[in-house]
Image: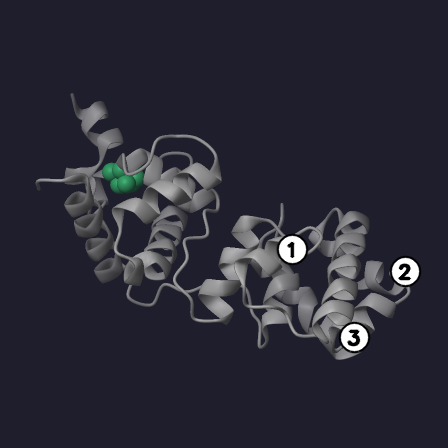
């Protein structure tokens, strides 16, 4: 292992081998559905989000319908995801903007996405990588934790971690790297008690090597 770039690529290739079926855990059929599911997933499990979204889309099938809905009707559906009043307000704002500015179609451009109300860089990257087949690194809690423990990026803001990972990795690896690190964070490199002895990249992990000293 010679350079930081080689180390990063080696780690990601091992994680890709370990998690060949890594994928996003939110259910969706359209970019709009993924955008809304991602907003609902804040401080909520993907499983819970997946339980409520089928009814949402059945009753309010497009951005215009969501924007025009009585908030109480959305509360009744979205309540199980927590913080449902705030989430409803944010989702209605973004749906209104998408409906009025983009004819109901979620844009596929990062600057247009992050200009939408309530859409940050992570959400925009989730959209681009998963709904539009782009190469981006959405830094969620798992990607942030795994990449900093491994020593691929210094602890810091999600934007700084994304920038560092993008510098280290070839662009064609961005999206699979994020999915593989996400899966690794959910299964082995958990927040509490990571299973380091059984980790396929422990020989390259700064955190593990520090503990072993
Ligand atoms: S060795 Fe431990 S801390 Fe490092 S990536 Fe693996 S599970 Fe995470």
Measure the alpha-carbon separation of dots 3 and 1: 16 Å
Residue located 17% across and 44% down the image? 7
State which tag comes first along the sequence, 1 or 2.
1
- The residue under label 1 is 39
204 or 50, nearer to the observer: 204
State which tag comes first along the sequence, 3 or 1.
1
Instruction: Report helix, strand or loop for mark 2.
Output: helix
Ligand 1 appears in which quadrant? top left
| 199 in relation to 23, above or below | above
Q: Which mark is residue 72?
A: 2
State which tag comes first along the sequence, 2 or 3.
3
**Residue 58: image location, x then y, percent:** 74, 79
Measure the alpha-carbon separation of dots 1 and 2: 18 Å
Residue located 41% across and 65% down the image? 23
| 41 in relation to 131, above or below | above
Instruction: Report helix, strand or loop for mark 1.
Output: helix
């Amino acid at each position: 292992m010679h350079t930081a770039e080689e180390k990063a690529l080696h780690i990601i290739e091992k994680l890709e081998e370990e998690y060949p079926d890594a994928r996003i855990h939110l259910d969706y059929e359209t970019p709009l559905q993924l955008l809304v599911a991602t907003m609902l997933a804040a401080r909520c499990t993907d499983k819970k989000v997946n339980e409520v979204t089928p009814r949402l889309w059945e009753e309010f099938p497009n951005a215009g319908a969501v924007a025009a809905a009585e908030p109480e009707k959305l509360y009744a559906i979205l309540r199980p995801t927590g913080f449902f009043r705030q989430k409803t307000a944010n989702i209605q704002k973004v749906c209104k903007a998408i409906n009025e500015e983009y004819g109901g179609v979620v844009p596929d451009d990062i600057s247009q996405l992050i200009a939408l109300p309530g859409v940050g860089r992570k959400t925009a990257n989730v959209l681009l990588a998963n709904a539009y087949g782009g190469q981006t690194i959405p830094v969620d809690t798992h990607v942030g934790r795994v990449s900093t423990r491994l020593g691929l990026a210094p602890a810091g803001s999600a934007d700084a971690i994304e920038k560092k990972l993008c510098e280290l990795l070839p662009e064609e690896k961005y999206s699979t790297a994020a999915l593989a690190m996400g899966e690794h964070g959910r299964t082995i490199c958990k927040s509490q008690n990571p299973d380091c002895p059984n980790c396929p990249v422990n020989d390259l992990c700064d955190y593990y090597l520090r503990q072993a000293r």
